[in-house]
Every structure is written in structure tokens, then in C-alpha cells.
Image (spheres, rainbow, N blue to C red):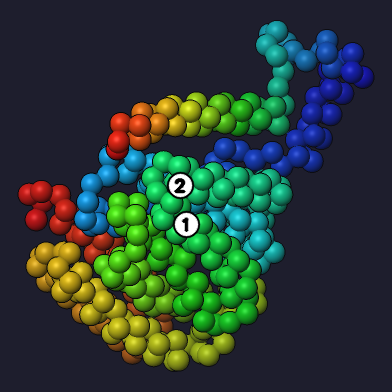
């Protein structure tokens, strides 16, 4: 069963076949990445401001 | 054949796993409530004497927004049983089965902790402490204790919604003062007539869910009487920022007129046996608060007033 899913997870045009769960998970992963990157950038600039006596 | 079986497995997994769309997670944050919280928090920040770097001010508003949203998510996790029974709330992501209750709880707790932590590190410990009190009050005192046990639920629970301008004020000044207490009182006293106006025309919903809202427990007449008392109390509190000197005379004049209209709306609700006036008053109550805090903000923008 596992081997089958490894070889047959593309649709007829060769694109990877994704279920609804996969699609939603992917969207959420990207959203979490965006939030984390924003948070890191924010912490960086807040640190600059605070160290500057702000 | 194999591909069909694979797809069927995936479809079965889809049905069994409420993974939730991104928009379901946004809905957990109660964005409409959040907009009012952000607005009043921002007003408190601007009304406070002193300067705060614009980036730190933006972080303060962000933390207030995320903290409020997180409380909303935890509230939806706890209230999922009664949310499923009420028309107003049955389309929320948890009763609809789009998000796992435990996912919602984790989401809320992580955001709540993160917002308090970041507020403390970036802005001020006083603001972080007030934000923590707000979240804990909303979750434990209002949601878990008062909401299902007393018709005074939203009177005391209203404190949670009244903290944001105080948090904004504390972000700038690092503390609490009489002015920020007045801003707190403004929302605190505004909350009962605002919510009871809604409860008057939704009381069937609350009764079905077993939530002891005032119109369900004490009847419509008593609710209308108390709404009128609160709007009368609110009138001078609305004008107080001008009397205390941290808002200008234009604010004072507008607050006097807007407060009078609010009292008139409560009188109209008192006289009206149908739900029409209550619906109108609910809409007006939102306008009233936006207008007062909008005027407070405009008062601080040079040249605006």
C-alpha cells in the first residue's frame, strides 16, 4: 500500500496529486512560515529601537 | 485501480481530519471583536501623555490584537457545546467541525502566551501584566465562571473588553492613572446596554443554550430598565475625558450629544414592545463607542480638531 502511494501520487498530467487535507496543510505551513519570518524581523527591529534608548 | 484506491484513502482522510482552512483560524480570533479592541487600545495609546517610538506603539497594538484574538479562540474552544445550539454562533469553525477543539485551544494558548511575552519584552511590563490580566479575566472569570452562572455575566465580564485602552495607556506611561481608569469605565459601563440590546432580540437563542442572559432570567421589562440606568450612568462618564482635561471641548460637546442620543435610544427601547428599537440601539451602541474613541484619537492628531 505504501509503495503504491509512492508511485501513484501524480495525476494524469503528471502533477503531484494532493488531497484536500494536503492542500490545506500546505497553505497553513506557508502561513506559519510567513508569521515566523515577520516575527523574527519584528524582534530584530524592536531590539535595534530598544538598544537605541527608544 | 491503485490510483483510485489511493484517492479514496485520501478522501476518507479528508473526511476524518478537520484540518481547517486558514480562514477558519482567522474566524477563531473573532476579527470583528478584535477590530473594536484594536481601535480602543490605539486610542488609549494616543490619548496617553508621553512619547512611544512608532514601532513599539505598533507592536503594542499588535500584541493587544493577538491577545484579544487568542482569548476569543479559547472562548470558542470552551463554549463549543453552547455555540452549536445558538443560531448566531453555530457557524463557528468548531461546532461546524472544521477545526479540532484541541487545535483551537493550542492555537489560543500559544498566541496568548506569545502576545504577553512579546509585550513585556518589547514595550513595558505594566502593559504586559494588564494584557495577561485581560486574557485571564476573559477566559477564567467570564467564559468559564460567570457566563453560564449569572445574569450579571456581561456586566462583570465586560471588564475584559474595557482593559484595552488601559493597556494602550500603560504602554506609553508604564502605569495606571485616573485618566486610563476613566477610559476603562467608559467601555465597562457601555457594555451592559450594548449586549442587552442584542440579548433582547436574541433571547430565544440564549434560552435554548441555557445561558442566563438578563432578558431570559429577569424578563425584557427589567432588562430595559437596567439598560436605561446604564446609559444614564454612561452619559457623564463619556464626557469625563473633557472634564479631566485630556480631551478637548469638541470631544466634550460631541460626547454630550452622543450620550444623550444613547439615552434616547434606551427610552425608545423601553417604550417599544417589538425588537425594532433594540436592534437600532445595538447598532447605535457600536457607532457611539467608535465615535467617542475616534474623537479621542482625532484630538491627538495635530490640526485634526
Compared with B15, B300 (above or below) is below
Q: What residue occupies the far right of the structure in this picture? A: A1
Q: Quadrant of the C terminus of chain B?
A: bottom left
User: What residue do we see at 15% from left, 74% from top?
Assistant: B243
Q: Quadrant of the N terminus of chain B?
A: top right
- Asked whether residue B232 is in view, the answer is yes
Q: Residue B37: percent from the left, percent from the top?
A: 39, 56
- Asked whether residue B268 is in view, the answer is no
User: What residue do we see at 38% from left, 45% from top?
Assistant: B123
C-alpha gap between disc 1 and disc 2: 8 Å
Compared with A50, B270 (above or below) is below
Q: Quadrant of residue B9?
A: top right
Report if the CB atoms under discs 1 and 2 are less than 8 Å apart. Answer: yes
Q: Quadrant of residue A12?
A: top right
Q: Which residue is mark 1?
A: B129
Q: Residue B233: percent from the left, percent from the top?
A: 30, 83
Q: Residue B174: percent from the left, percent from the top?
A: 34, 54
User: What residue do we see at 21% from left, 60% from top?
Assistant: B296
Is B149 on the left-hand or right-hand side of B46?
right
Q: Are marks 1 and 2 on the same chain?
A: yes
Toward the viewer: B260 or B1?
B260
Q: Which residue is mark 2?
A: B120
Q: Quadrant of residue A2?
A: top right
Amino acid at each position: 500500500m505504501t509503495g503504491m502511494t509512492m508511485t501513484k501520487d501524480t495525476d494524469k498530467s503528471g502533477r503531484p496529486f494532493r488531497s484536500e487535507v494536503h492542500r490545506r496543510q500546505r497553505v497553513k505551513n506557508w502561513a506559519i512560515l510567513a508569521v515566523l519570518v515577520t516575527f523574527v524581523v519584528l524582534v530584530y527591529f524592536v531590539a535595534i529601537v530598544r538598544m537605541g534608548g527608544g | 485501480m491503485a490510483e483510485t484506491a489511493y484517492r479514496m484513502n485520501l478522501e476518507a482522510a479528508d473526511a476524518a481530519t478537520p484540518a481547517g482552512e486558514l480562514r477558519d483560524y482567522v474566524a477563531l480570533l473573532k476579527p470583528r471583536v478584535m477590530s473594536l479592541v484594536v481601535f480602543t487600545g490605539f486610542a488609549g495609546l494616543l490619548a496617553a501623555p508621553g512619547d512611544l517610538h512608532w514601532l513599539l506603539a505598533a507592536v503594542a497594538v499588535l500584541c493587544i490584537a493577538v491577545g484579544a484574538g487568542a482569548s476569543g479562540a479559547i472562548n470558542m474552544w470552551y463554549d463549543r457545546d453552547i455555540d452549536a445550539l445558538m443560531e448566531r454562533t453555530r457557524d463557528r469553525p468548531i461546532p461546524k467541525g472544521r477545526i479540532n477543539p484541541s487545535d483551537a485551544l493550542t492555537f489560543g494558548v500559544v498566541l496568548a502566551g506569545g502576545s504577553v511575552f512579546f509585550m513585556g519584552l518589547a514595550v513595558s511590563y505594566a502593559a504586559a501584566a494588564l494584557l495577561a490580566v485581560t486574557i485571564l479575566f476573559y477566559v477564567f472569570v467570564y467564559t468559564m465562571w460567570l457566563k453560564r452562572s449569572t445574569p450579571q455575566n456581561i456586566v462583570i465580564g465586560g471588564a475584559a473588553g474595557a482593559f484595552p485602552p488601559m493597556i494602550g495607556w500603560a504602554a506609553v506611561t508604564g502605569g495606571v492613572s485616573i485618566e486610563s481608569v476613566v477610559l476603562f469605565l467608559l467601555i465597562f459601563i457601555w457594555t451592559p446596554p450594548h449586549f442587552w440590546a442584542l440579548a433582547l432580540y436574541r433571547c430565544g437563542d440564549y434560552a435554548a443554550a441555557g445561558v442566563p442572559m438578563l432578558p431570559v432570567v429577569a424578563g425584557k421589562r427589567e432588562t430595559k430598565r437596567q439598560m436605561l440606568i446604564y446609559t444614564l450612568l454612561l452619559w457623564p462618564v463619556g464626557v469625563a475625558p473633557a472634564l479631566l482635561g485630556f480631551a478637548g471641548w469638541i470631544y466634550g460637546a460631541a460626547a454630550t450629544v452622543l450620550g444623550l442620543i444613547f439615552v434616547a435610544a434606551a427610552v425608545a427601547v423601553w417604550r417599544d414592545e417589538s425588537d425594532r428599537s433594540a436592534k437600532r440601539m445595538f447598532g447605535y451602541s457600536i457607532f457611539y463607542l467608535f465615535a467617542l474613541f475616534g474623537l479621542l484619537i482625532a484630538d491627538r492628531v495635530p490640526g485634526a480638531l
